[in-house]
Image (spheres, coloured by chain):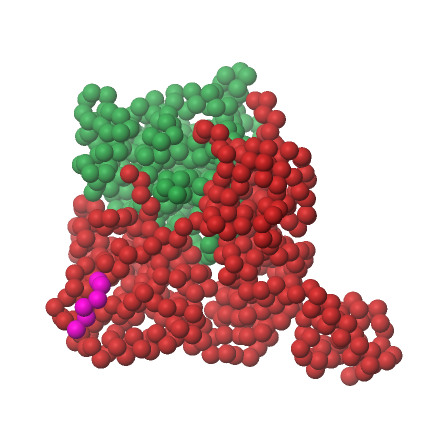
Amino acid sequence: MEHLDRLENISIHIIRESYANFKNLGMLWSIGKDSTVLLWLTRKAFFGHVPFPLIHIDTKYKIPEMAEYRDRLTKEWGINMMVGINEESLANRETFPDGNVDRITCCKNLKTKALKTTLNGEGPRYVFNHEAGKYEIDKSEEPFNAIILGIRSDEEGSRSKERYFSPRNIENEWNISDQPPEFWNQFKTDFAPGTHLRIHPLLDWTELNIWEYIKKENIPTVSLYYDNGEGKRYRSLGCHPCTFPVASDAKTVDEIIEELKSGKFSKIAERSGRAQDKDDCGGLETLRKSGYM
Amino acid sequence: MNQEKFPLVFAGHVDHGKSTIIGRLLIESGNLPDGKLEAIRSYCKKNSRPFEYAFLIDALKDEQAQGITIDTARVFFSTENRDFVIIDAPGHIEFLKNMVTGASRAEAAFLVIAADEGVQENSRRHGYVLSILGIRQIVVLVNKMDLVNYSQDCFYKIKADFEQFLSEIGITPSGFVPVSGKDGANIYKNSPLTGWYKDKTVYKFLEQFEMKKPDRDLPFRMFLSDIYKFTEMNDSRRIYAGTVSSGSLYKEDEVLFLPSNKKSRIKSIESFNTAELKHVSAGMATGFTLNEQIYATRGELIVKTGEKQPIVSKYFKAAVFWLGKKPLNRNEEFIIKTGTSKTSLKLIKINKLIDTSTLKSMTGDAVNRYEAAECIFETGRPIAFDSVDINQETGRFVIVHDYEIQGGGIILDSVNNEHIRKSEKEIFMVITDKCPDLNKTEELKHARIISIKENDFVEVLDFMKEKGLIKK
């Protein structure tokens, strides 16, 4: 079996196990390449269907093209789409671009907090109404008790220590030093009331695997990943004030694969264009312990 | 393109230098991303700590502060011929469950032993865990040779010592290598400091490990994950989904669901974004439709008629390794998960209790944390399984209690039903003989549990006394 096939099968198995074990399940879709691969694997796992909501945490500082792409696929693939926003912090201008807080606090406000209130149902959530063709406020306040995320262990140190099924307490906090064991393909699927689970089907994938799979399956990706003639492209997508394009003239998936395999990026970390990592002493551990993806 | 990534674990006692060897390996083979080494060096300088290779791996702040690996970390690594995922497992006893997690995913293991300290508790314990997990390719690295002046005697003494231990748990290591993480001896290149050692370096061993092939030649086994019927977009398919544990399945094959014993024939193999599939085999997450709709539930084992059948029983004998803070005992009810099946579990009897740090047999009626045991179990309802020597995937299980996985085990054998019935009868006779005025219905109610202890009538009688069935 080819390596990509093996990765695909393990990920599908994990996604199906999540669906079988958890009633209030959702999947985070950041619009980036990893979570889009995750969405594709979900369609594979359920033979063309996406049987749970996809959640997008919108910081309102995302690059505009991302929302257009999100809504196009939502319609095409019949996705049950939910968007969560921390409107309070935005209204109070508690953000880095407003100049009122540092990058780390901005991430905490617009991502970690927004994620928390979206998952527990307290914050404002918008769901896409396919008949009306627009987003409407979500009247249900039902919380999610398990979410699937597209993080990979090769991204940064703390992510390399993740479990496929990782429990978080009610505050979304992660206790790194006391994680459940995973024997063979048996995971933690039972949990006490009040905790919730984060599920990571892509842990064993690398950035290169993601691109090879995008090529193999012909998965549509947002055009920001490709050079449009200006000699730069995004390698990792985030908010525009903190994510910077890299110098590259890769215009196609094939050229990106080449660049990662033997070209200029074969030895440069993917998140080198993400400023919040540097502000967290070169890693994301502080952010992730308190609930960051 | 797209070759396999070989999963490899480094195990061993705390502070015997696993992370240091990995750090060395990454640097000498040119596998470090630009800037990583500099970042760690500047971190060390800023925090007035001497630089250590281990910091490359122990990227978590807690770990850097304490200087030990807490959790399993994955590191990607390539040689000229293949790619690896290196799993660095913690050697501290407190983090044994993390070691299990890491080693569970590995195809091969390096077991690291420090030359100055020799074989320690967790060297043995990790060896035992590797054997239960079914990892067969094991290379022992005798590290910190610099601390014993690269002494040949010291190396061979440890080798003899540990070889003996490994043979007792059924492991034949692929080799022993004298190394120094600090000096880099025999890691990437053979070192002149150990002129007496002519065998392979760590790097060479790496390249020779073999990936286990999915078990396509074994009988077909697939645990049912779910049955999907998504009616949206006019989809009328009723799909039985799961991951194939072993063997292959073709269109038209007749399948049997166990333990419900329902039969049907494969109508189609379903997939998304591929050409029509005629067959699927071990390792594939798949789904199929059936000619005749049957009612089945998650957890059933799907097999093919006409192939060797698994065992369906409520009783089995297994080797377990216990991680739970609370012991595995006979008073409580546990949950067993094998494949996607889940049911209640009771410990019936401990045949043998083992201290995994010494391999010494112990006595006791419960299995405590980090102990291993050979036990007889009874499940709440019958489950379908194979013994682990016939099929690894369907011969493994975990035990859950208080929402946590508390231990893992491998099924050694079924406990024969005939045998149970026969001994029930025998015991019944013994009991009636000894206690003619005993209430016979009560007695029968307990006969099944008692029967497991057929070899020990004294124990049976004690049990009867305990239950108030016999006057003391």
Q: Residue furthest top?
A: A132
Chain identifier matching the red colour in the rendered picture? B
Residue A211 location, quadrant: top left
B170 left or right of A21 in image: left
Image coordinates of residue A53 in percent, x first then y, are 51, 31
User: Number of marks in the image?
Assistant: 0
A232 left or right of B135 in image: left
**Magenta region, residue range:** B196-201
Image coordinates of residue A260 in percent, x first then y, are 24, 37
Asked if residue A202 can be seen in this view, the reply is no
Q: From the viewer's perspective, is residue A15 above or below residue B460?
A: above
* Residue at x 24%, y 48% (from the top left corner): B81
Is residue B184 in the magenta section?
no
- Relative to the observer, which residue lies in front, A27 or B144? B144
Asked if residue B321 can be seen in this view, the reply is yes
* Residue at x 49%, y 71% (from the top left corner): B371
Task: For the C terminus of chain B, give its image quadrant.
Answer: bottom right
* Residue at x 23%, y 34% (from the top left corner): A258
Dominant secondary structure (helix, strand or loop) of the stretch shown in magenta: loop
Image coordinates of residue B46 in percent, x first then y, are 19, 55
Residue B351 location, quadrant: bottom right
Residue A225 location, quadrant: top left
Chain identifier matching the green colour in the rendered picture? A
Task: For the N terminus of chain B, give its image quadrant.
Answer: top left
- Relative to the observer, which residue lies in front, B311 or B139? B311
Q: Residue furthest right?
A: B437
* Residue at x 37%, y 56% (from the top left corner): B107
Q: From the viewer's perspective, is residue B89 above or below residue A122?
A: below
Image coordinates of residue B45 in percent, x first then y, are 17, 56
